[in-house]
Amino acid sequence: MLPVPVTAFPIAPRTRSRTALVASADSSFRQRLSETLIGLRWQVREAGSGAQAWSAAEDAAPEAVVLDSWLPDLDLAEFITDFRGRFPQTDLITASGFESNESPRGPFRQELLYALRRCQDTDTAVWKTAPELDGSSAVPAPLKPGPQTSSELASASVGPLRLTVPKAIPIRGDSAPNRESSREQSATERLPELVGNSPSMLEVSRRIRLVAPRLTPVLIEGPTGSGKELVAEALHRLSSRNRKPFVAINCAAIPEALLEAELFGHTRGAFTGAVQGRVGRIESADGGTLFLDEIGEMPLALQSKLLRFVESSELQRIGENETIKVDVRILAATHRPLAEHTKTGSFRADLYYRLAVFLIRTPALIEHPQDLEVLVEHFLEKMGRESPVKRVDGSAMAKLAAHDWPGNVRELEHVLERAAILAGDESLLTAVEIDFGLSVN
């Protein structure tokens, strides 16, 4: 049966708009496809990676998802399998015909294939009908510019599609320019958790992408309030352990006498007050990620016990003789210069070198002041989810820009929250409402 012409797809005023999610590391591909879909009266969201696509779908499941033939952070086959299990009603198609013929098809499948056909760059690749359909290898002529007839639209969207790369363009090895450029581009795009487009913030995103798929221990260094826990969460989200627990513990927030039991667990009666046994944070993170925040505050005696676990992946609950094998990836964070503390003996050098296999440094806000405006907008939009969105005027922004931000991004969020409260029902924040509180002498 022939598909309905494009002009027969009006959206009734009271009908909810159809939403498509386009996932590709290639921004030009996303732009071309998005423009075509918007012309077909779709609302379009874009994602530069598989993890971003998953996060966007969790926020609001789209009617359709279009995947490029390669994702920079996730295996395509695994992503498709997991996505279909989580979002069975979403129509999922790929630009390369990767999916099987058993794929569930939504009511707008032909329209989506038409959009794919329109945005395809004929200089680097051509579309042809799948051999299993008719055994033909003939390549249809490119669509002409402008509106298409019903028969032309039908010929552009028959059945599953396959992408054929010309022989002159290699698809493996270091000489594959398309894949390498996509990888390079994805490395310069910031992660959604990290707000800011300054070089220092883009470098944080780049390093996260490089190490996230590995089991390598990571040490995150940076001043208080600079987003170290956000980095740890992004590392977990982009790892193969993202379906397993992410367990965080602040080593500075728990009294020294209780920290060992909190980490390793204990049996009933192991010490005064232990009326029942308890699984420790390390064991509860089995299969996932353990985040040790403010690792520099951990007592030396406990550092020794943690070192034994890091080396052997075995722990011993307090009051128990048997050891337990636990599989966790360890991420640690500190605002202290741990390398210097190893020289003074306040932090074990052997533990430091075990944890700092890969280093990520989160910059202080004063080091990337060009991101202040986008951070302000981000936090005001975030507060606007529960109350009317407020904006800042020029005097308020000037006062914010003149501050040295000892509390970094966390302080900025709190200052804006305080200003929003002081402004009451006013929608515009002025310099009068910008109060730095006790952070200013």
Image: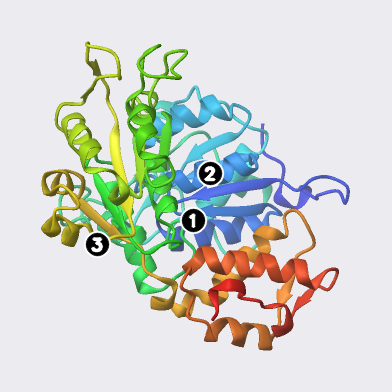
Q: CA separation, marks 3 and 2? A: 34 Å
Q: Is residue 122 left or right of residue 154?
A: left
Q: Earlier in the sequence, mark 3 or mark 2?
A: 2
The residue beneath circle 2 is 55
The amino acid pointed to by label 2 is Ser
Q: Name the side, left or right, on which 358 lies relative to 77.
A: left
**Residue at the disc numbered 3:** 337
- Amino acid on which disc 3 is placed: Pro
Q: Earlier in the sequence, mark 1 or mark 2?
A: 2
Q: Residues within 10 Å of mark 1 (few under 14, many from 20)?
A: some
Residue to which mark 1 is pinned? 192
How packed is label 3: few (under 14 Cα within 10 Å), some, or many (20 or more)?
few
Could you tell me residue 297's position as x and y percent?
A: 31, 49
Q: Report the amino acid beneath label 1.
A: Pro
What SS does tag 3 mark?
Answer: loop
Q: Nearer the viewer, residue 331 or 19?
A: 331
Q: Give the distance between the C-alpha atoms of the residues marked 3 and 1, in whole angstroms.
A: 28 Å
Residue 35 drawn above or below residue 430: above
